[in-house]
Image: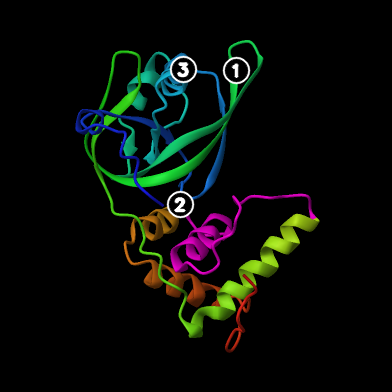
Amino acid sequence: MKQDTRLSPQWYEAVPLFPLQTVLFPGGVLGLKVFEARYLDLMGHCLRHGEPFGVVCLNQGSEVQRSGAAAAAESLARLEACATLARLEEVDADQPGILQIRCIGTTRVKLTHPHQEANGLWRAQGVPVAPDEPLPPPQDLQGTVRALVDAIASLREQGLEPFTVPHQLGHAGWVANRWCEILPISLAAKQRLMELEDPVMRLQLVDEFLRTKGVVRGQGREPEQ
């Protein structure tokens, strides 16, 4: 996944953030229902200028802006220190004041100095994290690759297509990221895996989890590309 070279150093000085109780991985698909004024304005800006926004996991606080005492509590929100930039793919405005958004995760960004503007929008200084090297999954992790192929087939039988195509089964990071999106693990665990800069190690950790659950056993066979 290439970094967006169109973004200036000045843009990274004030990365706009969308805090959510979720973790977006590079290459991942995220659907959003946007109705708050601060985020409607942000989406409009991103559409006009072709810029992304950062999706950051909340480890304390609410996703929704509140008033009164709840607004004071929102100021105590704690954001994770690494986010993933999201590129808008589809925007639907069938209902007045509501946007249905589909976006794709791109570059990871390390965040410092988060702050809220007057309208409640969070921003932070950001430093891009190098994308995963396109390393192939080692032979001893091929069972986890094959299990993802089976999981994709099962999801398709249910009418679901949660991943972008073409599938990159020959990239350890892509396989690990897709597993991380669908595994029943905590947000904290997903965040740590997303931040991990070694894609093969990330896949190894996923493999260990799948083996404890009996999803993967023995040596896997080569998946079809």
Q: Residue 98 carries which label?
A: 1
N-term-proximal mark, 3 vs 2: 3
Residue type pointed to by label 3:
Gly
Mark 2, residue position: 187
> In the picture provided, is 5 more to the left or to the right than 33?
left
Identify the residue shown where x is 30% and y is 39%.
5
Identify the residue shown where x is 29% and y is 33%.
7
From the image, give the main secondary structure of the stretch colored magenta. loop
N-term-proximal mark, 3 vs 1: 3
> In the picture provided, is 192 more to the left or to the right than 117?
right
Residue type pointed to by label 1:
Ile
Looking at the image, residue 155 lies above or below residue 171: above
Q: Could you say whether the residue bearing mark 2 is in a helix, strand or loop?
A: helix
- Of badges 2 and 1, nearer the viewer stands 1
Q: Which colour scheme is used?
A: rainbow
Q: What stretch is highlighted in magenta?
A: 158-186
Mark 3, residue position: 44
N-term-proximal mark, 2 vs 1: 1
Q: What is the spatial separation of the Cα atoms under label 3 and label 1, in whole angstroms? A: 12 Å
Residue 108 pos. (x, y %) = 34, 47
- Of badges 3 and 2, nearer the viewer stands 3
Foreground pick, 212 / 30: 30
The stretch drawn in magenta includes residue 161: yes
Identify the residue shown where x is 62% and y is 84%.
221
> In the picture provided, is 157 more to the left or to the right than 19?
right
Q: Residue furthest top?
A: 96
Q: Could you say whether the residue bearing mark 3 is in a helix, strand or loop?
A: helix
